[in-house]
Amino acid sequence: MKIKDIAQLAGVSIATVSRVINNSSSVREKTRNMVLEIIKAKNYRPNITAQNLAKKETNTIGVVIPDLDNPFFGKIINGIYEKIEKENLNMILLNSYGSLEKEKRVIETLLEQRVKGVIIVPVAKDKFSSYKHFNRLDEFGIPYVLIDREVEGDKFSEVYLENRNGAYKATKYLLTKVSDIAMISGPIRTTTATKRLEGYSIAMGEKKKEKKIYYGDYRIESGYKIITQMIKGKNLPEALFVANNMMTLGVIKGLIENNIKISENILIFSFDEVEMAEIFGVKIDYLEFDVKSVGEKAVDILKSKLNGDKSRKIIKIAGKIKK
Amino acid sequence: MKIKDIAQLAGVSIATVSRVINNSSSVREKTRNMVLEIIKAKNYRPNITAQNLAKKETNTIGVVIPDLDNPFFGKIINGIYEKIEKENLNMILLNSYGSLEKEKRVIETLLEQRVKGVIIVPVAKDKFSSYKHFNRLDEFGIPYVLIDREVEGDKFSEVYLENRNGAYKATKYLLTKVSDIAMISGPIRTTTATKRLEGYSIAMGEKKKEKKIYYGDYRIESGYKIITQMIKGKNLPEALFVANNMMTLGVIKGLIENNIKISENILIFSFDEVEMAEIFGVKIDYLEFDVKSVGEKAVDILKSKLNGDKSRKIIKIAGKIKK
DNA sequence: CTGTTAGCGCATTCAA
DNA sequence: TTGAATGCGCTAACAG
């Protein structure tokens, strides 16, 4: 069933059918209704592939994520979806698996698909990373927005959590309660870890308190290992600021195993939320981020680019202290 | 940059370029290499939209999920993705929001996109639900596989967790330890809840033990409410079989609040995994399912359908007792 | 308000 | 092994 069939059944030209489908130029009320009826009766659906080719554009946007099996990105995807759905856009989802090679490849896929725009969590984590494959998108005139990671350079539009300021606020908050505050940082080659560490350092420096920094790798095990060593060495701080929720989980595990009461014997502050803590009766302070809005804001920026806005846009999502 | 440009630069016809792109019919080695070089030099990417139109087919499959912000489905999506990636297929992801109306609409979207196949978590939950909108896919000759939900009728290919047998195994296991076993069931209008309840009932019946059934709605709050009332009424069973992990979380919350030690004062068995329990030092038995494989198996079935297999296929994913 | 026609970028017969 | 021509289903001038 194609446009031609509908046209014949309706006794009009395909141009007219096309017009009623697209609501483009004016069609006589009566004609329109008749065509509409036939379309409905025949359950006809226009072939979007053909439409796209004729219009030289696409109605899909590409989303590239480094890990599809991660609730954090699930929220972002959700935010993106709800926004683009309203624009009648579709989402093609790609996984970069956190690998630069894969990232380059999926970008080529997106190019072939002639997607309308791209939202991507860049794999690159440090200042030595290469971003030049993003130029390919520029070559094809496809607008894009980087999310979640703070990226070096001054040409990209981005949306990410306020890393430095968030850590600063968190540390300031902890300083109102105690003065012996240690931090478990993420791997220093990542920009997020660097920024979060900076925030902690600045706040501690302002109050001239001694900094105690431990380095983890953002995963549960490293949090567990570090806290276990602290406990063995009997040098637990009054408060511990942990750079992400995974490591916080490790910390919680270690503390519970050693019967150390959280918030009684030690204050734990996680950079981001540990979702289940409350259910298990564990009291953790954290920064609350509207993660979904990362996706939403990215779509907003993309839309403005699609409308011709050439300016660079940076949006930082603010965190709110939850206690 | 289109195929014509490449052809001109190479001094050959577009047919030849098309042939090397698709590796279709034989092209002289020398010619092929030359064309390939130009393609590379110019960073040319064929326009998939045009390819699809010419070939009257698409390289994307549609995936419909009722909740993008749910780790369970994240795992399934991940399983689907890894499989189709190898087939050089793309995934367009749609959200039905658990609404039948939305489901109908996204199916129309998929029709317009002329997707190659569909994998869908049907919204329909009970025997009174309507499945006739799936016929639309049949009309367009698009193969599809239903996942996660057990659906009434005898025409659909499906992949889901073994609900009844899983619950049966779980209850049998609990019966080896105690005899006073209560169950918190899901809402009885859903097939999953019905099946799980059946499994429990059969196992209890075989041993002529008294059944104690409470009805929740699969959400945290209902688990919490039910356990709280049990505690107040001082009628805690020796063991409690909870029909899903969300309600189990509610149960855990209630028990912890009331200082009742899990696995000491009461045995808790969750139908599916409560991921964080171990970290928080809580001992929960559960059925372990390879959730990701739901997606993988669905792709397998879809592939066979794409190859012309008309038979109906049902795959049940087995659960393994984890203690 | 409506129809005719020329593409959109590519695959694929059919000849050569 | 190659090229010319046709068409995939639809949109968008252009003309009427």
Image (cartoon, coloured by chain):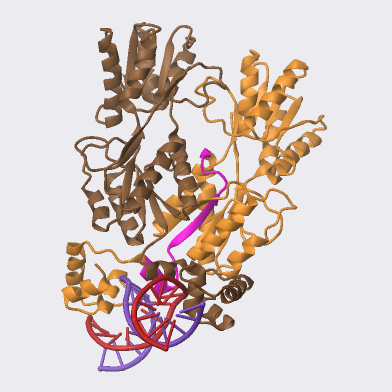
Chain colours: A orange, B brown, C red, D purple
Q: Quadrant of residue A31?
A: bottom left
Q: Position of residue A174 (x, y in %)?
A: 69, 29
Q: Position of residue A85 (x, y in %)?
A: 40, 55
Q: Nearer the viewer, residue B257 or B125?
A: B125
The magenta stretch spans residue B66: no
Q: How many marks?
A: 0
Q: Nearer the viewer, residue A152 or A113?
A: A113
Q: Nearer the viewer, residue B195 or A184?
A: B195
Q: Residue at x 39, y 44 (%)?
A: B300
Q: Image check: A170 left or right of B318?
A: right
* Camera sees residue A176: no
Q: Image check: B184 left or right of A102?
A: left
Q: What range is drawn magenta here?
A: A49-71
Q: Against B42, is B248 above or below?
A: above
The magenta stretch spans residue A65: yes
Q: Position of residue C8 (x, y in %)?
A: 44, 77
Q: Image check: B221 left or right of B127?
A: right
Q: Residue at x 73, y 40 (%)?
A: A199
Q: Residue at x 82, y 29 (%)?
A: A210
